[in-house]
Image: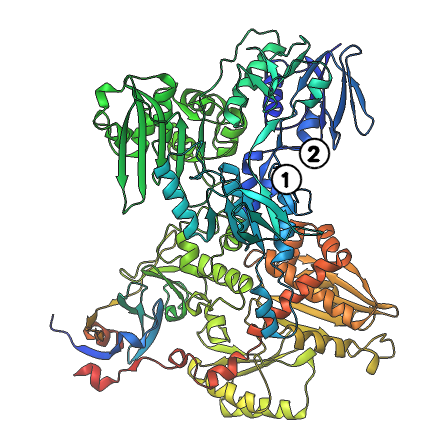
Amino acid sequence: MAEKLVIIGNGMAPGRMLEELFEKAPGLYDVTIFNAEPRVNYDRIMLSPVLSGEKAYEDIIIHNDDWYLTHGVTLHKGAKVTEIDRHAKTVTSANGVTAAYDKLVIATGSLPFIIPVPGHQLPGVLPYRDLDDVDRMLEIARASCSQAVTPDLAEMRHKTERKGRAIVIGAGLLGLEAAYGLKRQGMDVTVIHLMPTIMERQLDPAAAYLLEKALTERGIDIITQANTKQILGTDKVEGIELEDGRVIEGDMVVMAVGIRPASALAKEAGIAVNRGIVVDDGMMTSDPNIFALGECAEHRGTCYGLVAPLYEAARVLADRLTGGTSEYHGSVVNTKLKVTGINLFSAGDFAEAPDREEIVLRDASAGVYKRLVLKDNKILGAVLYGETADGSWFFDLMKRGTDISEMRDTLIFGQSFQGGTPLDPMAAVAALPDDAEICGCNGVCKGKITSAITAKGLTTLEGVRAHTKASASCGNCTGLVEQLMSLTLGEAYNPAAVTPMCACTELGHDDVRRLIKAKGLKTIPAVMQELEWKTSCGCAKCRPALNYYLVSDWPDEYADDYQSRFINERVHANIQKDGTYSVVPRMWGGVTNAAELRAIADVVDKFEIPMVKVTGGQRIDLLGIDKEDLPAVWADLGKAGFVSGQAYAKGLRTVKTCVGSDWCRFGTQDSTGLGIRIEKFMWGSWTPAKLKLAVSGCPRNCAEATCKDIGVICVDSGFEIHFAGAAGLDIKGTDVLGLVKTEDEALEHIVALTQMYREQGRYLERIYKWAKRVGHDEIRRQIMEDADKRRAYYDRFVFSQKFAQVDPWSERVSGKDKHEFKPMATINYNQAAE
Amino acid sequence: MNGNWIDIGTIDDIPPRGARCVKTPGGKIAVFRTAENEVFAIEDQCPHKGGPLSQGIVHGKSVTCPLHNFVISLESGQALGADEGEVRTIPVRNIDGQLSIMLESLLVAAE
């Protein structure tokens, strides 16, 4: 029978250890994990991108539920172990689960240090340690930067100016990443630091100065040499007071002042503990059946807080558990700061000392600072700011203790200046020896990656990550790994993991949408610059998509880019195969009258319009109009009260109705009235693809509402809202969203659903495809069950309508874009024959 | 060149990344202005199904036809990518923003 292995803690270190274990000896152990957090193993290094909105939780999961199933692991989520009984060889959790072990691994990680100043227990004082902390920060950020919409626009604008304020105590790696993330979430951020310079453990004062300057330019206030006296507030955080009497207001205080190993559980069980749980070179504690791994462990007097050394130790432990004799000898570590746009690398020891030398390179205009600390012709430490491409090379030289006297003169310029190696980065990667480390987090060398690619026939980055772990943690070496794949596979390597929007970018629609919000990008050139578009001004695929995303995300601030609209949306008519246009005036709910029909008849006569046709959406279509005549046609239609029917728009098209209870003997509600109301509320709104609605007065469904993007079936008890139908390339009946009682509720639900689709849909993706992608249940949950969410969607739609409900036809009759409707020049025969 | 340069207006008459038409006895000519303020003139007829190229989206030095998304090079008149076809390019001159086109070849077409 398999031996029982119990693990306390489900962080990255035990996760890695299990991967190694299952690879070496699948089935050797029957594994049980107790996780105090209510979730699976995720990439803690990537919490900062989640906080800044650049990644989602789903993106940083390392092992999903399937992984535990596949490997037969029993995972107790939300189960904090409270007791280890070394005599009975069992552990017991707070929620009453007891498990027996043959071998036990303690991987309880570390606890954030909270400075015990007065007020530290107030709600709103947070550590920065796990996903729950991130969620709480985001919650406060959202609540304090309230975007609540009121009908009054002026008041609305006033409200958005109220920014939340965050105070971060501690300008170390985590503190600065938290500050950056909260700034990204729209808060005003102040960082308080005890020492004279920031990140003093990783940076020398010169690099710290550059970093401080860069962060200040990003709008983050930094106060150094500041000691917190107390946290102010009565029932929640309101600010802090410094020793010198200064008071800083804030809605939250994030403490990022350090961690201490979580060793209390081990100590209570009588295991030897110093700062952390003491382990030998085989990761064994003072009890031969118990091991410790991760931030809770203390090895040769050192507790590590970075992933690379923990992964090295994980490998040793996996080997020991399978009967091996590997030893862990401690690690040299390096750090990088995950703040978009700031390149920073630091490794080793860079303090000044009499027997040390340094090489410094500064380029003030480029914002570059590099410093190497040498001793006996070996690199002892490196700090790189602004230009960090050579970081891994310096780090490699440092770890190997390479004698650098031969290349000393050019060392600081980096690898490409050595030994006549060309400047081509591919050649530089090709020149690396097989045992050169590529992935620092996971200790993966070049040879392991290239041989895995060849042996396992890997062609995707995901495949390489799955098999080698290279670039699977912090992701900073992704570029190097991709270069290795290109080198090994040549043309066969296609770096696009998701389907890119178009040939101008590697990013998919969802990434682009997310990054537009996260980075606050508000123009097409800004998107293209920040997201590294490969073309100078995009193409006919990406430009209309970007234009829509920006209109949708920043309705008040974004200026529509006319030249990125498809011709129909540029001239507000539908182009036909012969280059003429068709014109569809809006008939609210499909209802018209004699005056309107007369006006249409007159226009048809006056402009000799060759074709008049009733559309599927209950409108009248005038076909075959020359572009030059469009403004005059619109002018005449406008006089009769018509506005554009937007039959050309990726936006609200029509609301089709039946006659309902006013006329029909079966009608249960005023379907015509509701249809008109919806159309008057929603006209002018842009959506990812066209949006067609219908309201039927009874389940006989004469308005064919059950194949529409959104449909309503009126019943005696109220209004059944349907969505995600299709009757085009695909045919699909709608699904029921839910039943509501009143017209007001029906409108609110329909509008909220539309807004959710507007915010999430990919350009040209109809609502049924979007719904299939995100899940009908999730949509129901957000729109039917979560009233706050529904109301927020509704409010955002209402806000955006203030800028969208402008009749494009009357604008153009008044002279807008008049160049569109006239030739630039007309050349006659005489001129041409001259 | 012994052709016939005919004034058609100024560069400001055309929006950046946009196009305007010039009507001639030989058919419409589409005059394009790129983001970099280069000016090109081609026949306003897609080689695929005759779509009005002047109504397309301008990107880089090409235009995408509004009817079926053929991408046409403004420089060479060639269809780009996997598509095949070609439209005539018309010589265009830009002197301090004053634009003129060369109509010699057009007359041949008009006959």
Helix, strand or loop under label 1: helix
**In the image, A223: left or right of A665?**
left
Residue type at mark 1? Leu
- Would you name the residue on which mark 2 appears? A37
Q: Is residue A499 left or right of residue A76?
A: left
Residue B13 higher or lower than A739, as above or below: below
Residue drawn at (71%, 70%), measured in percent from left and top?
A694
Q: Position of residue A741 (x, y in %)?
A: 84, 68
Question: Quick check: do tags 2 and 1 share a chain?
Answer: yes
Question: How far apart are the two marked residues, 2 and 1, measured between alpha carbons?
Answer: 9 Å
The residue shown at (71%, 31%) is A36
Q: Position of residue A690 (x, y in %)?
A: 59, 65
Identify whether A342 is placed above or below A444. Answer: below
Residue A228, percent across and down?
A: 56, 43
User: Percent position (x, y) of residue A753?
Assistant: 69, 61
> Which quadrant of the view contains residue A697?
bottom right
Q: What's the residue at 48%, 63% (across, down)?
A: A547
- Asked whether disc 2 touches disc 1, contact meaning CB atoms under 8 Å apart, the reply is yes
Query: Disc 2 sits on a residue from what chain?
Result: A
At label 2, the amino acid type is: Glu
- SS at circle 2: loop
- For marks 2 and 1 on the same chain, the one whose residue lies earlier in the sequence: 2
Chain of the residue that carries numbered disc 1 in the rendered image:
A
Q: Determine the residue positioned at 51% across, 85% down.
A: A634
Q: Which numbered marker is on residue A131?
A: 1
Front-most of A339 and A115?
A: A115
